[in-house]
């Protein structure tokens, strides 16, 4: 089946925005369709209907740090910029969308904040609705001298939002109030969960069974397994993703079958750690490490579970790996997409 592959890039080099490809989820073949110009769309989110895409523009100043709305034609793959709004926080690096596609949240890395926006009926963005600014620090002298928000993730039932702060080694918990747009986010109880000092929490993902959550720590190179119940995270295991201690662990995803977890690691011996998930207690067992091209960032698994695609920032490639769905192991198909500074990958089903 052919689906759309959407790619966000950094635009300091030859790339100039978001790129759209056709991806054959049975063969791994790709073909370029179109692109749209936008500054540094380093992270993307697709709405639940698949007809709108939202991106950050990740810049190190407040003036050029925006959130951007695009309409997407699911028949021909055409993408059109609708509008942009300031996030009022530098270096927005992650974006997510609430249920009913009405609320957009960004994590602002340098700004140490998260910003909330509401969408119009046509999918475009209204000005900023709410902002939460954080403060804190931890062990690492340069990387943790202030709050650095790195991702915002909704709970499986969309009742809670979790925000990872790399700078303070915390996961903040918010109640989500869909009926009160001026108070869309309010701190939960507890308001945050402490992570081991010096960890640098980056990305969080929930198990498809909704009983467990997994956190990749950028600085420590570890993965923490949490038992998840009633909005609370209880740590039950910590295991190593990056044995080379490069302080560059990046992304984390679970195979659609719920049996395997993958995590990307950068800066030394770049690659993907592969773990088997114990289906009863959620704990991880390391089974392999697959080398990638240079500086793997975000990666994505095809909906049918056959392929893993990884954006390699510094080698200007998107690698396509075949997944053995019995063992979880990866095999490079050598069907690389060549693109300058790819960062973020998303799929959209045609309509």
Image: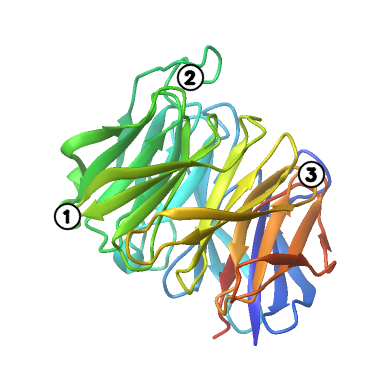
User: Label 3 crowding class (10 Å Cα cut-off): few <14, some 14-19, many 20+?
Assistant: some
User: Label 2 crowding class (10 Å Cα cut-off): few <14, some 14-19, many 20+?
Assistant: many
Pick the residue in front: 202 or 55.
202
Sequence-first tag of 3 and 2:
2
Label at residue 230? 1
Residue 13 x/y as whole percent: 81, 41
Residue 32 visible: yes
Residue denoted by label 2: 144
* Residue depth check, mark 1 versus mark 2: number of the one nearer the observer: 1
Look at the image and name its color scheme. Answer: rainbow
Residue 238 position by quadrant: top left
Q: Secondary structure at mark 1?
A: loop
Pick the residue in front: 261 or 29.
261
- Which residue is located at x 52 percent, y 58 percent? 253
For the C terminus, which image quadrant?
bottom right
Q: How many marks?
A: 3
Q: Secondary structure at mark 2?
A: loop
Residue denoted by label 3: 294
User: Label 1 crowding class (10 Å Cα cut-off): few <14, some 14-19, many 20+?
Assistant: few
Disc 1 from disc 3: Cα separation: 40 Å
Residue 104 x/y as whole percent: 38, 53
In the rendered structure, are the residues bearing label 1 and label 3 in contact, judged by CB atoms less than 8 Å apart?
no
Residue 298 x/y as whole percent: 61, 51
- Which residue is located at x 17 percent, y 36 percent? 190
Asked whether, in this view, residue 9 is left or right of residue 148, the answer is right
Q: Is residue 8 above or below residue 162?
A: below
Q: Is residue 343 above or below residue 218?
A: below
- Which residue is located at x 75 percent, y 67 percent? 331
Q: Secondary structure at mark 3?
A: loop
- Which residue is located at x 74 percent, y 68 percent? 34
């Amino acid at each position: 089946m052919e689906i759309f592959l959407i790619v966000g890039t950094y635009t300091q080099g030859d790339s100039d925005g978001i790129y759209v490809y056709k991806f054959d989820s049975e063969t791994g073949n790709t073909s370029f369709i179109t692109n749209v110009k936008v500054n540094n769309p380093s992270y993307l989110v697709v709405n639940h209907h698949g007809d709108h895409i939202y991106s950050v523009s990740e810049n190190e100043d407040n003036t050029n740090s925006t959130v951007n709305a695009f309409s997407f034609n699911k028949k021909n793959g055409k993408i059109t910029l609708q509008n942009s709004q300031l996030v009022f926080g530098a270096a927005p690096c992650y974006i997510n969308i609430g249920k009913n596609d009405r609320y957009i949240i960004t994590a602002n890395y340098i700004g140490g904040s998260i910003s909330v926006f509401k969408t119009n009926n046509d999918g475009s963005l209204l000005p900023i609705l709410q902002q939460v600014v954080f403060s804190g620090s931890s062990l690492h002298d340069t990387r943790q001298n202030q709050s650095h928000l790195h991702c915002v993730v909704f709970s499986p039932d969309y009742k809670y939002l979790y925000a990872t702060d790399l700078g303070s080694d915390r996961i903040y918990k918010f109640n989500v109030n869909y009926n009160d747009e001026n108070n869309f986010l309010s701190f939960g109880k507890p308001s945050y969960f402490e992570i081991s000092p010096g960890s640098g929490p980056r990305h969080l993902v929930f198990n498809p069974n909704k009983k467990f959550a997994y956190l990749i720590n950028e600085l420590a190179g570890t993965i923490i397994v949490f038992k998840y119940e009633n909005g609370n995270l209880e740590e039950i295991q910590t295991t190593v993703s990056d044995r080379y201690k490069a302080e560059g662990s990046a992304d984390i995803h679970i195979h659609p079958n719920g049996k395997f977890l993958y995590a990307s690691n950068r800066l030394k011996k770049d690659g993907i750690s592969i773990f088997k998930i114990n289906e009863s207690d959620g704990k991880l067992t390391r089974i392999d490490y697959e080398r990638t091209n240079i500086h793997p960032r975000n990666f994505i698994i095809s909906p049918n579970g056959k392929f893993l695609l990884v954006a390699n920032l510094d080698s200007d490639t998107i690698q396509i790996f075949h997944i053995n769905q019995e063992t979880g192991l990866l095999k490079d198909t050598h069907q690389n997409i060549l693109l300058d500074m790819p960062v973020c990958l998303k799929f959209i089903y045609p309509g």
